[in-house]
Amino acid sequence: MATALVTHPSFLLHEMGPGHPECPARLTAIAERLVATGVDGQLEHYVAPRATREAVLRAHDARYVDSLEAASPSEGLAYLDPDTALNPHSLDAAWHAAGALTLATDLVLEGRCDNAFCAVRPPGHHAVRGRAMGFCIFNSVAVGILHALEVHKLERIAVIDFDVHHGNGTEEIFAGDERVLMVSTFQYPLYPYSGVEPLGDNMLNVPLAPGSDGARFRDTVTRLWRPALDAFAPQAVYISAGFDAHREDPLAGLAFADEDFAWVTRELCDVAARHAGGRIVSTLEGGYALAALGRSAALHVKELTAPSPVRG
């Protein structure tokens, strides 16, 4: 078995206007770095299917999904919020991004792959049940987790979010759901200006002050995340992998380095090896400095391909 890379051509067709930081070049930067470092040759490539309506409605309100269909333009852009727009291909990309997470879940939980990385656009962790926001349309990681809970009948899932922006949508969807433990770091104050007061006892949110570096992040993971994750003993680990906490990123003010993303991935692989048979599903969230994104995401995926005590 191997690490799955799940993506779809529609992700390169979703565009929100000239100069928008959430652009198709993000996926190109990752793909080129995976090839340049030789990691791509270690991956099993899969084309994401379109998610079923049933799968998406586990995470989102039917009225919201219907409103997106009505808003999708035949040309030009239709804005869902000041930062988030649909072009004629965007909604198709969102359906396939959610489908990437359901396929990755099936691949990993059925034992066809060790773990998976979903190279998707648009990202998802800001999308709440009834609203798009922050570049996000469907909350793909939530769709994948709910697929694991409802279809594969898992009882405990951990979702780890290290994007520089708080994953408010994921928190809203799972707040109070004892089957899910969410642990996260994010810069505060920063969009979406949430997370300081957790919405449920199953949320471990750790806001980081502007300028916080990799040492502060590693301390948080070691001192707070690891004990909570080990106590919860998840049966699968999901990662909202945002790389915009990098010191080169233009949209925020944390100071992580490339190796910090490799290090946290090793830590999460260890959690998964201890408790979840090595089962990890990771999905791309933020990251807008293209060179730093490519390097950091490739290191993240490289760590997923490394042998663990579970995989041999």
Image (cartoon, grey):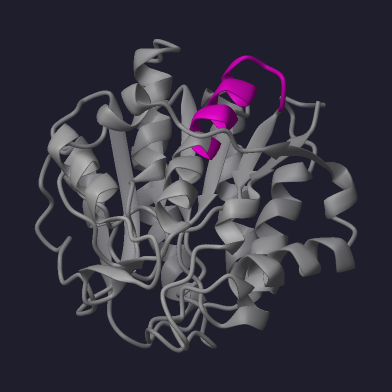
Q: Is residue 301 above or below residue 247?
A: above
Image position of 272 (left or right of 61): right
Q: Quadrant of the N terminus?
A: top right
Image position of 132 (left or right of 115): left
Q: Position of residue 95 (x, y in %)?
A: 44, 42
Task: Answer whether residue 277 is visible to the viewer in this image.
Answer: no
Q: Which residues are magenta?
A: 100-113
* Residue plotted at (12% across, 41% down): 200
- Occupied quadrant, residue 106: top right
Q: Position of residue 237 (x, y in %)?
A: 48, 35
* Residue plotted at (49% across, 84% down): 249
Q: Is residue 106 above or below residue 136?
A: above
Magenta-span inclusion, residue 110: yes
- Occupied quadrant, residue 226: top left
Task: Answer whether residue 104 is visible to the viewer in this image.
Answer: yes
Report the label total. Answer: 0
* Residue plotted at (28% across, 81% down): 209
Q: Quadrant of the C terminus?
A: top right
Q: Position of residue 79 (x, y in %)?
A: 25, 70
Magenta-span inclusion, residue 138: no
Q: Nearer the viewer, residue 290 or 277?
A: 290
Q: Nearer the viewer, residue 256 or 148?
A: 148
Question: Which is the main secondary structure of the residues drawn in magenta?
Answer: helix
* Residue plotted at (87% across, 44% down): 42
Q: Nearer the viewer, residue 133 or 205?
A: 133
Q: Position of residue 100 (x, y in %)?
A: 55, 38
